[in-house]
Amino acid sequence: MERINPEPWSPREVSRLLQLVDGERRYYQELLAAVPYPVAVVSAVYEVTAVNRSFRARFPSGIEAHLAAGPLRELASSCASKGGTLMAAMRIEDSEYRVHASPFADRLDEVSPGAVLVFEAAPSAPPPEPAEGVWLADAKGNPLSPAHRRRPILKEDKARVEAAFRRAVETGEPAAVDYRAEMSDGSVGWMCDRVRVKAGGRLAVVTTLETARATAFQSWLLRSEIEARGQGIPLPPPRPELIELNDLLRRTGANAFLHLNLEPCYISADRAQLARAVESFASFAARGNAPVFRTYMRQVFEDHALPPAPGAYVALEIGPVTADPFAPGMTDTIAAARSIFAMGACLWLNSGVNGHRLVMLFPRAGVAASQ
């Protein structure tokens, strides 16, 4: 754009222009002040130069201590140096926030931009999965209450379920058995029956839906499809090394929305292959969508006799995708999926109203996951 030369302007014209500029400035200041989220403008030297009313109400003592060091300073620095909007989850003054950061260039120092920080209260954790039902059964596992309708068990798992019920009756000890059942939408999900013997030989049963098993089953099905479609695609053996997944995402997904985990997520994987896989998935997700990356710790435990293992796995989500990334002919994403499976990770598609999300589940390095 051609630069304006103000030299031929009259004083009256300059005065009128300044009035217009001041009016625009006041308008945007009032707009910013009314935003319901805490907003702060941070300079290139990490000093807070402007805040709105919501910020003053939420952080009366300021955030300078958090800008001196730690994840907030790192987020502001990454945003200013890389450009684009970044997002990270972090804890500030005993509360969880999702902080959105965008670069902001001061008129007097456009070479060293600062950042605009918007603080969004993180949503509370979802409630635990509710029990499918608490019911009474006979020794063979048949419901004694006509009101309880059991989901149809896959025929491959029926004998194992019946054996668990018989074992509980014979020994008088509690038992647990997981199995596949047909869901109301026709899909297959993993269920778990926890059985306890009551007086008179009756059995008290608690049935729950096991989401960890369900996702593992989805991953197994997807892997079978991908291996069949990717026979002609060469796959070099992975060379695993210790990787901090949040750091890899910052380097790989600079133009995507990043939902980073509060603490480091270390996994053992082939850095080059994982970076290529993430880039392939992100490129596919970006077709008509803005890809979102999210990392988080996942509680997964396979053996119900063992206690839960929080943080035993690290999950990475990329999406949304509105088409099948593994349809025949999708060479890049099929190759990416094969490399993910070769690293010992799980991969599946989570369905939602806005499309699917690719979910990768890696064993967390240094943590013994229950198998």
Image (cartoon, rainbow, N blue to C red):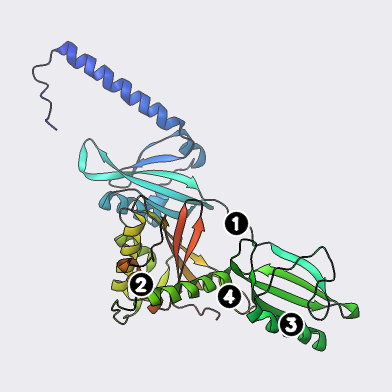
Give amino acid for label 1.
Pro
Tell me the element at label 4: loop
Q: Indicate which disc, 4 or 1, sits on the residue closer to the N terminus.
A: 1
The C terminus sits in image quarter: bottom right
152 sits left or right of 359 in the view: right
Tally of numbered discs: 4
First in residue order: circle 3 vs circle 4: 3
How far apart marks 1 and 2 lie (CA) works out to 29 Å
Q: Would residue 252 appear left or right of 54 to someone viewing this image?
A: left
Q: Residue drawn 32% across and 80% down? A: 238
The residue depicted at 34 percent of the width and 48 percent of the height is: 85
Q: Is residue 8 left or right of residue 242?
A: left
Where disc 2 sits, the SS reads: strand
Tell me the residue that label 2 is attached to.
243
Amino acid of disc 4? Phe
- Name the quadrant containing residue 321: bottom left
Q: CA distance from mark 3 to mark 2?
A: 45 Å
User: In the image, is 91 to the left or to the right of 143?
Assistant: left
Residue 272 percent location from the top left of the image: 28, 72
Taking depth in this image into account, of 198 and 249 the one nearest to the observer is: 198
In front of the other: 293 or 158: 158
Q: Whole-Å distance between the Cαs marked 1 and 3?
A: 33 Å
Q: CA distance from mark 4 to mark 1?
A: 18 Å
- In primary-sequence order, the first of circles 1 and 2 is 1
The residue at which mark 4 appears reads as 301
Q: Residue furthest top?
A: 12
Rounded to the nearest angstrom, the CA distance separating label 3 from label 4 is 23 Å
> What residue did someone put label 3 on?
162
Query: Which amino acid type corresponds to the residue marked 3 in the rendered image?
Result: Glu
Residue 355 location (% of width, % of height): 46, 54
The numbered mark at residue 126 is: 1
